[in-house]
Image (cartoon, helix red, strand yellow):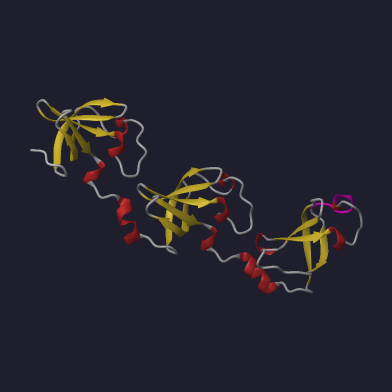
């Protein structure tokens, strides 16, 4: 009556922490374990998606006659979205999604129901050092991203936000040449020198030995917000400096 792989219908009789019992006929119940309820959602309790007296369709996963147990699957009634991932998405593709969670290491973005990708902090901005995703993004925000990697086995998609725009560092290297004279405003005064703001959110660095006013610390002779006349002495695209 209930071959493995067949679809059956039944009534939910009991909800337990580990799953839901479904009556297939009088005296015959099967168990939908919590791990067999959804391909993509983290189900902590069956009550998140089922209630007593619900009529459900399930797939027979296993029958243990000796112990009088039938294992049922709810998620198996629909295709696993990750099994179709190669057909729908590829590396380099632009996808739009909504920010679902912000973590210290990055942001999770839902690109379709149940399918999320991760933007690591390093892939949020070309120019800013992002320490926490919430510095730049908000929960619920809609974003256009680019797929950087797909790991079907681990069910992971890596996304990039900054890659949707041209790297401003390479733009500025076309405009600034070694020997050019520019004006820039001081934005930071670390011990080794002075940091100045250039175009496109990029910063330049003036080491202590290249400052006109001497001293062991830049703070002794310079102030944040001060405008300096400077000469470009080095452009290093490989190290983004």
Task: Tell which residue pokes out farthest to the left in this image.
Answer: 1
Expressed as whole percent of the image width and height from the top left, the position of residue 105 reads 55, 46
Magenta-drawn stretch, dominant element (helix, strand or loop)? loop
Residue 196, given in percent of the width and then of the height, sits at 76, 59
- Is 206 in front, or is 164? 206
Taking the view exactly as shown, the residue that stands out farthest to the right is: 214
The residue at 47%/50% (across/down) is 118
Residue at point 16%, 44% (across, down): 5
Q: Nearer the viewer, residue 224 or 122?
A: 122
Quadrant of the drawing holding the N terminus: top left
Image quadrant where one finds the C terminus = bottom right
Count up the numbered dots. 0
The residue shown at (34%, 35%) is 43
- Rendering coords of residue 153 (x, y %): 37, 52
Q: Which residues are magenta?
A: 219-224
Q: State which quadrant residue 7 falls in.
A: top left
69, above or below 134, in the image: above
In the rendered image, residue 239 lying in the magenta stretch gets the answer no
Q: Position of residue 85 (x, y in %)?
A: 34, 56
**At 37% across and 60% down in the image, what residue appears?**
89
| Closer-to-camera residue (19/153) | 153
Q: Is residue 42 above or below residue 152?
A: above
> Residue 75's image quarter?
top left
Q: Is residue 142 left or right of residue 105?
A: left
């Amino acid at each position: 009556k209930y071959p493995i792989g067949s679809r059956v219908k039944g009534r939910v009789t009991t909800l337990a922490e580990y799953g839901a019992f479904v009556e297939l006929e009088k005296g015959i119940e099967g168990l939908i374990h919590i791990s067999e309820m959804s391909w993509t959602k983290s189900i902590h309790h069956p009550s998140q998606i089922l209630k007593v007296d619900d009529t459900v369709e399930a797939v027979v996963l296993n029958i243990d006659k000796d112990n009088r147990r039938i294992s049922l699957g709810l998620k198996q009634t629909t295709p696993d979205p990750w099994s179709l991932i190669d057909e729908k998405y590829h590396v380099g593709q632009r996808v739009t999604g909504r920010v679902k969670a912000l973590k210290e290491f990055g942001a999770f973005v839902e690109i379709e129901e149940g399918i999320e990708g991760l933007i690591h902090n390093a892939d949020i901005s070309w120019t800013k050092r992002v320490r926490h995703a919430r510095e730049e993004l908000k929960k619920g925000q809609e974003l256009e991203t680019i797929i950087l990697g797909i790991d079907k086995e681990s069910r992971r998609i890596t996304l990039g936000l900054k890659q949707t725009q041209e790297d401003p560092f390479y733009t500025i290297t076309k405009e600034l040449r070694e020997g050019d004279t520019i004006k820039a405003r001081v934005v930071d005064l670390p011990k080794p020198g002075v940091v100045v703001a250039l175009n496109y959110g990029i910063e330049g660095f003036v080491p202590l030995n290249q400052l006109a006013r001497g001293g062991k610390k830049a703070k002794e002779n310079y102030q944040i917000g001060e405008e300096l006349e400077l000469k470009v002495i080095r452009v290093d695209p490989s190290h983004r400096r």
